[in-house]
Amino acid sequence: MKVSIGDVVLPGDYFDEISTDNAKSRVVIGPGLRKEEDHVYITKAGVLKKKNPHTYWIDSYQKRYVPSRGENVIGIVSQKAGDIFRVDIGGSTTAALSYLSFEGATKKNRPEVQVGDIIYAKLVIASKDMEPELVCIDSFGHKGRLGVLTDGFVFKCSINLIRKILSPQCPLLESLKNEWPFELAAGMNGRIWIKANSMKETIALGNAVLGAEFMSQEEIKKMSNNISATLAGHVY
């Protein structure tokens, strides 16, 4: 069935507008879409979304993570095998991370990474026919915010919540930052790492983030207006 932006779609539907855009400029196809010959097909149920100029994806509520190229994820180093680290990112298989995929890494200058470390990385390979591959540097060789995350606290949530808090329209993170200094990394695999001045504040902030999942924008703003009292109410 032919669909349009904003429609609720099902696997097997196809979307020809992408083919039209592709003839004019470069098109980015995100999670939930797959190109086959002249059609772009829907691969999971959800709402068809578009970000200008030419980025498309399916917005759906899911807990199981399916790796997608270009996404930032939070993983746990589960094994060291020669020059490769095996990283659990919550998918059906572990991802590979080379020791050379860190800023300034060489054969003599290897990164300090141990089994059990928390890694914030980017997926450079994500295919149903190949194992996922991660890097902790950008295209210029700089780490930016990627790499090993020290201290802090990691918790799981729905992928829907990750998309919600990273949306520019969501006031939650900006309001929390103004009231309570902290660091946060959100992985598109449904994991959040958060670090505040104390464990008490870290847990409180994590509970505030989790509590925002089913709140409307207005409810989030209302909570943010009295953030100190709200966060204190999450600490036991």
Image (spheres, rainbow, N blue to C red):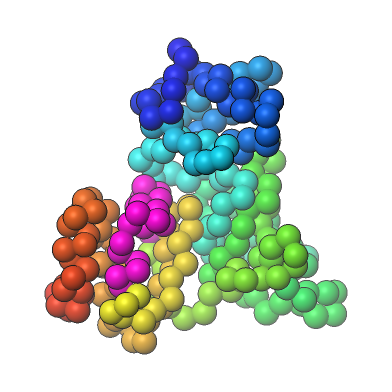
Residue 220 lies within the magenta run: no
Q: Position of residue 23 (x, y in %)?
A: 69, 25
Name the residue: 77% across, 76% down.
Answer: 104
Identify which residue, 83 or 204, lies in the foreground. Answer: 204
Q: Nearer the viewer, residue 25 or 230?
A: 25
Residue extending farthest to the top is 1
- Horizontal relation, residue 74 to residue 106: left or right: left
Quarter of the image with the N terminus is: top left
Q: Residue furthest right?
A: 107
Q: Magenta includes 167? A: yes
Q: Is residue 17 above or below residue 209?
A: above
Q: Residue at x 48, y 52 (%)?
A: 189
Report whether 2 appears left or right of 123.
Answer: left
Do we see residue 116 in this rendering? no
Give the quadrant of residue 30. Answer: top right
Q: Which residues are magenta?
A: 156-176
Identify the residue at horizontal 73%, vertical 60% (top origin): 139
In the image, residue 137 lies at what x, y percent? 69, 65
Farthest bottom residue in view: 197
Q: Can residue 181 be spotted in the picture?
A: yes
User: Is 134 positioned to the left or the right of 211 in the image?
Assistant: right
Q: Residue at x 68, y 18 (%)?
A: 37
User: Where residue 29 sits: x, y (%)?
Assistant: 59, 36
Tell me if residue 42 comes above or below residue 205 in the rendering: above
Q: Please tell me in which quadrant of the rendered image residue 181 appears.
A: bottom left
Q: Main secondary structure of the magenta part?
A: helix
Percent of width and height locating residue 18:
58, 26
